[in-house]
Image (cartoon, rainbow, N blue to C red):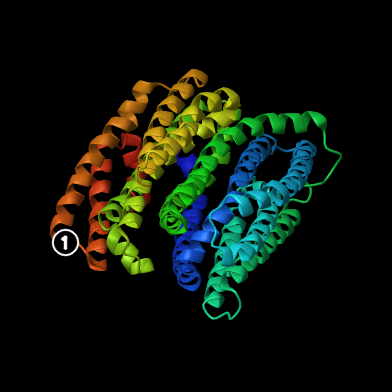
Amino acid sequence: MSFQVSYINRIGQNTLLLYLRMIIVTCLNLYTLRLVLSGLGIKDYGIFDVVAGLITIAMSIGSALSSSTLRYYSINMEDGKSKIFSLVFSASLAIHILISLFILILGESFGVWFLNNHLVIPPDRINVANSIFHFSLLSFIFTFLHAPFSSAIIAFDNIKAFTFISFFEGGLKFLAALILLVVKSDKLYFYGLSLFVISSFIFLTYVFLAKREYNNYLNFVLPDLNTIKQLMSFSGWSFFGSTASVSVFQIITILINLFFGPLTNSARAISIQFNMLLSSFTSSFIMGLKSPMIKSYAIGSFEEVNYMFYLSNKIIYYSLLVVCIPLFFEMDTILNLWLNVKDKQVVLFSKLILIYSIIMALNNPISIIIQAIGKVKEYHISVEIFIILVLPITYLLFYFDFPAYTTYIVLIFGAFFAHLVRLSSLKKFYLFYSHRDYLNFFAVPATAITTICVFLGFLFNRFFHGSFISFFLLTFLSLIFVLFFVYFFNFTDDEKKFFKFKIFKQS
């Protein structure tokens, strides 16, 4: 128990800051979306989503390289390793610059051609759609290039700086959305330009803070070819995994555009906001845990790794369950109050995406251990096949005139089977994991608690529904029920002791 309390105390403050960041940034983003949708209108918002989505596919490269960089930063932070750290930084920066140039050339050639020849864009908006594409491409470049610096901030557990920058970015986007309501020029053009300017400011902020705080570690030297090879090998397979998920999402957006048009794209774009909300919620906890978990594995503290693995699964799942129960049963009310949207298709899309998001969130603790081990190639090859299969199945369903929502059903099943393969891969590569422990410590109790809480939510919804008060009450009851059942039926004795110590100040 002593190592567990001390270890969680060490990451507790960071986790609290990240949750605070998540709450504030999420509230800002939710209201910002309302303003953007009001300012642009449903059609222009759909155009923005599908055009910017072409660039989002490339963001998976940034995610993979960021994970790779953070891993090598984390295992080279001991005293006397500043030179090795600088080698990793230099190699990472060189790779990011070269890939940025490649994506810029590819985007300005193939991307522009695809936009003008294949996407369904109203003729009177094709020029501004091209401008949005250029702005989105440049925004991606700046976002992509800050990874070597932002990863250093996270590796050194400087969560205060990361939280500050997140607040700064959310505030700027909120300001841009406010101005969007009163601007006289083309609103879609202005919004794309605003996001480009904001991404450039955020890039400069990360560079300034990282260099000021960790200048001894972030010295640029001639990149070492061996370090470049290690980073590329690790990130290459992480990129494959990230690309599978991100590309599937964005290509489905394109397929919906081709088969159903911009209005259905808008419905999908709104539903994806819930996926982004839950992903942000999950990352707020995982970000504070990822670097310590990798460090624990690197020094052979497998008991700590296991403890954090099971605890993170519980925190992620039950936190999302508390949020998703009221969202699911009151989705029509929330969309009406939040965005003044009453479209049944949007409601259905948004409900289904909640289920998908919860399943995908549980992948995070598994992926951290696999990254710490370094078996990313074998892991992603076996896992992502189920995610990639979603694309041909979706295309066939659309081709044979199935409705748009069927792609969400396919996504849910794909995510579920992929999760089973992830667990099998974890057992294969990590000797200290067992399926029996996973079932006993998490999966079986979680299934039972979910069934009970969803049933109680269903009963409440039958009698009280359709107002903000009912949503608030259901959220409160969901929190109470989930905490009650988890504490008594899924917490271990050590977790109960720690919970009492933290909440009630008892030993």
Residue 421 image point, x, y percent: 44, 25
Q: Position of residue 320 (x, y in %)?
A: 36, 48
Q: Nearer the viewer, residue 68 or 482?
A: 68
Vertical relation: 229 (above or below) 95 = above
Circle 1 SS class: loop
User: Which amino acid is tagged 1?
Assistant: Phe
Residues packed near mark 1 inside 10 Å, few (<14), some (14 to 19) or many (20 plus): some
For mark 1, what is the residue? Answer: 464
Furthest residue to the left? 463
Q: Is residue 180 above or below residue 127?
A: below
Please tell me which residue is depicted at 35% across the width and 40% down the height of the picture: 409
Would residue 151 be found to the left or right of residue 11 on screen? right
Quadrant in which residue 344 is drawn: bottom left
Relative image position of residue 377 (x, y in whole percent): 60, 25
Expressed as whole percent of the image width and height from the top left, the position of residue 480 reads 24, 52
Which residue occupies 27% across, 63% down? Answer: 472
Image quadrant holding the N terminus, namely top left
